[in-house]
Each structure stands twice: as structure tokens, then as C-alpha cells.
Image (spheres, rainbow, N blue to C red):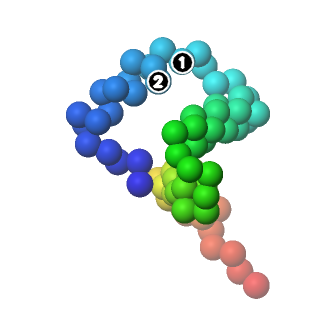
Amino acid sequence: MPYIKHLDRIKYKVILNNMPEIETKGDLEYCVSVLMKQFMKTRDFRYSTLHDCTYAVQHCADEFRRLNLDKREDEARIQNGEITS
């Protein structure tokens, strides 16, 4: 999960707060890919570390979906009604 301790967040804040705007989906994918490669630079290229890297990104996507996309879907369901057969 992306919820690390506040003290641990400090070392990333300066870099992340000074990034230019990520304008497109492709730009976002590029940034995520670079972060994944950066993570792997100091680790052995083996299944467990590749798994950790891939699943960290997946877990962030799952949490983003849970907090944002699912909420939007619930709002649309309430506004437009349930699906009926």
C-alpha cells in the first residue's frame, strides 16, 4: 500500500512536488516505468523483486480505483439508477 510513514515521505516530497505536470496517459506510463526501472537498478533481477515491483504498481492502481473510480461508479449508479434486465 502507498501509505508509508510521514517521516519516510519527506525524502520524496521535494522531487514529487517539483515535477512538471503529467499531461497525458503516455506521460504517466513513462513516469511509472522510469520509477519501476529505478527501483530495479539496485536489486537482483529475479522473480521475487520483479514481482515486488509489478505488484507495488498494481496495488497503487487498486487503491486508486477503490478510492476514486469506484466512488464515481457509485455516484453514477445513484444518479442513473440500477441496471435492470
Looking at the rendering, which quadrant does residue 22 occupy?
Answer: top right
Count of marks placed on residues: 2
Marks 1 and 2: in contact by CB < 8 Å? Answer: yes
- Residue 15 visible in the snapshot: yes
* Circle 1: residue type: Met
Q: What is the spatial separation of the Cα atoms under label 2 and label 1, in whole angstroms?
A: 5 Å
Q: Position of residue 52 (x, y in %)?
A: 52, 57
Q: Identify the element where label 2 is drawn.
A: helix
28 to the left or right of 4: right
* Vertical position of residue 62 compared to residue 13: above or below: below
Residue depicted at 56% across the width and 50% down the height: 44
Residue marked by disc 2: 16
Depth check, front residue: 74 or 78 = 74
Depth check, front residue: 45 or 51 = 45
Looking at the rendering, which quadrant does residue 58 occupy?
Answer: bottom right
Depth check, front residue: 61 or 11 = 11
Residue depicted at 54% across the width and 18% down the height: 19
Residue depicted at 76% across the width and 84% down the height: 85
Q: Residue farthest to the left? A: 7
Residue depicted at 62% across the width and 51% down the height: 45
Q: Position of residue 66 (x, y in %)?
A: 50, 58
* Circle 2: residue type: Leu
Q: Which mark is residue 19?
A: 1
**Quadrant where the image shows the N terminus:** bottom left
